Image (spheres, rainbow, N blue to C red):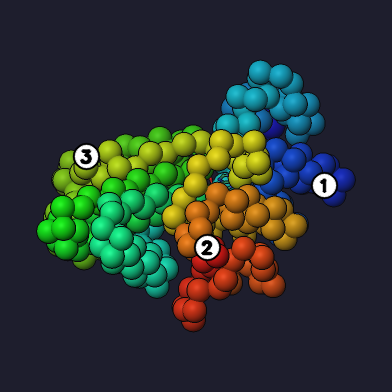
Amino acid sequence: MLSRLPDLPGEEFGRWQKLIQKYSGIWIPEHRKTFLQTSLLRRIRAHKLADYASYYNKLQNGAWGSLEWFYLIDHLTVHETSFVRHGPSFDLVKRFSEARISEALKRESDCKIQVWSVGCSTGEEAYSLALILENLDKQELRRAGLGFYYGVTGLDISLPALQQAREGVFEARKLSALAPRLVSECFEKVSDSEYRIKEEFRKRTCFVRGNLKELRQAPRHNYDIIFCQNVLIYFQPQTRVKILDELVARLLPEGILVLGPGEVTDWKHPDLVRVDDKYCLAYQRRV
Ligand SMILES: C[S@@+](CC[C@H](N)C(=O)[O-])C[C@H]1O[C@@H](n2cnc3c(N)ncnc32)[C@H](O)[C@@H]1O
């Protein structure tokens, strides 16, 4: 069994890079080689295997390999996230949703907003979006006898991250980005150091496992808001463009795609126009 961290020779590192990219689309650059070695070593130890090569071969072996990928991918993905991580992007979602309410009032129809948090990690992003939608001013809609309906779907490749997201339990320190009023109205204390998001928000959110590299095969649902931040950076430019095209294919006319600032450069799509907001990287789908 391996006890120390042998260096992956260049050739072997290259075949791991390709295998991981083939499975997940994620590209492990040279400067993250030590990170890859550490992740592989954990799994090799867990299975008491002899070396990188034995693990490489077993990973491609039918049912064993399919199951093992779940664990390896969890080690290889970065789950860092927080509530309202990039404030201006969430402000944009709020303005967009308020405009949707005004349009619904003019049309005298219910207001419905479907949101997709792509690469949702442990759920903070999806729940931040739900908090915004839940806390919109809906008095005028109510007065006009109209309804407001929304749903947030979170997608991620990591099963442990999704499990945490579904539970909706967060350490108290993670809630510091939220206004105290929101914390007291939208969360319940479960222990001295933990809070759970209230049932009404959990009912409005669902978390599903999906691989961005395989979006093409995924069922088509259309969304008014697609929020995808701090995910595309793990892919090579040509893979990013393919993922973005699949996201656009799932965006409703007039819907918005919100990316992380600076996450893509020189990307244009014929169906999209850039949202005029210097703090956000967002696009709106033409009618
Ligand atoms: C750094 S987190 C970003 C979380 C959140 N979007 C935010 O901005 O705070 C990146 C997430 O992308 C997910 N991810 C990475 N590759 C993926 C893939 N191929 N398909 C789906 N999710 C993926 C990871 O599991 C991780 O939870």
Left or right: 200 as drawn, with respect to 113: left
Q: Residues within 10 Å of mark 2 (few under 14, many from 20)?
A: few
Q: Residues within 10 Å of mark 1 (few under 14, many from 20)?
A: some
Q: Amino acid at mark 1?
A: Gly
The residue that mark 3 highlights is: 199
Q: Residues within 10 Å of mark 3 (few under 14, many from 20)?
A: few
197 lies above or below 50: below
The residue that mark 2 highlights is: 287
The residue that mark 1 highlights is: 14
Q: Kindly report which numbered mark, 2 or 1, lies closer to the viewer in this rendering.
A: 2
What residue is shown at x 50% (from left), y 74% (from top)? 275
Mark 3 vs ligand 1: CB under 8 Å? no
124 lies above or below 106: above
Marks counted in the figure total 3
Q: Residue furthest bottom?
A: 278
- CB under 8 Å between callouts 2 and 3? no
Whole-percent x, y for residue 129 in the image: 35, 56
Cα–Cα span, label 1 and label 3: 46 Å
Q: Quadrant of the N terminus?
A: top right
Q: Amino acid at mark 2?
A: Val
Q: Amino acid at mark 3?
A: Glu
Q: Mark 2 falls on what kind of element?
A: loop
Cα–Cα span, label 2 and label 3: 35 Å
Whole-percent x, y for residue 162 in the image: 43, 38
